[in-house]
Amino acid sequence: MRRKHDVIIACDFPSGQDVFRFLDRLPGEKPFVKIGMELYYAEGPAVVRALKDRGLPVFLDLKLHDIPNTVRRAMASLRDLGVDMTNVHAAGGRKMMAAGLEGLTGPDGTRPLLIAVTQLTSTSQETMNEELRIPGLVQDTVTAYAENAKAAGLDGVVSSPLEAGMIHAACGEGFLTVTPGVRFAGSAQDDQTRVTTPAKARALGSDFIVVGRPITQADDPLAAYRRCCRDFLGTERPSDPSDPSDASGSAGSSGSSGASGSAVE
């Protein structure tokens, strides 16, 4: 896996044909891509394998949330796909998260990064309090869920960039923050409520940003991707994970020392 900081493109397309057509518009690039429920449910594991055959890092965003045994068995089914990162819902609790970690870990101790969703970036303060019936402030709930994820041995969490600094303060700088809810200045927020720009996300402490429509629906997606990398990373292209000169190429983890080997290095 490449450096700790990266731009992940959310490939929220209805078919594999659509995602590969999009990727063909990024000549010379090997972006970190996120595959979510829409594409995975349509195409199954084959689309992940095809992306890995192209040499792309993959974040499989399925947000598992069920009883611990079911999550353990589901993660065991996913672990041989060769993804670089996957996730669960932190709302499932520590026992469920730990079970997911157990299922995801191979016999040799290697595994992808495992992170937990705290609160969706479409969840507002009002929605959390009045519909989900969770009292208090969003940032306090996000931080508490992050602390649970760390206690369960996970590598990091999904949050908005606005909470990244608080999560690092509570869980340590090595605990990863993977943050959707990123838009260019002046862009539409769409269905997101807790958002910021790529540059602001890095200033707030995000380790990875997840960007979808501002890149995938741009007239020139290559220019949009490079702009996002420039704003977030200070360079137009992330370093090649195979380049031995990139000393930051390993995505270390404070959550679990077991995340070692080719799956995460």
Image: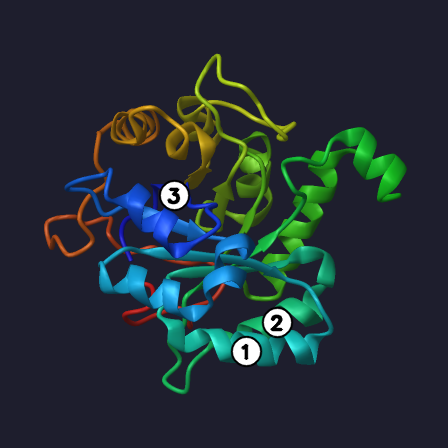
- Which quarter shows the N terminus? bottom left
Q: Amino acid at mark 2?
A: Ala
**Residue 98 occupies quadrant:** bottom right
For label 3, the residue is 8
Percent position of residue 122, x then y: 66, 35
Percent position of residue 198, x then y: 41, 26
The mark total stands at 3
For label 1, the residue is 102
Query: Upstream in the sequence, badge 3 or badge 2?
Result: 3
Does residue 85 sit above or below 169 in this rendering? below
Does residue 69 sit above or below 201 in this rendering? below
**Residue 48 occupies quadrant:** bottom left
Does residue 151 sit above or below 193 in this rendering? below
> Looking at the rendered structure, which numbered label has been put on residue 252?
none
* Residue at the spot 56% in from the left edge and 47% down from the top edge: 158
Q: Residues within 10 Å of mark 2 (few under 14, many from 20)?
A: many
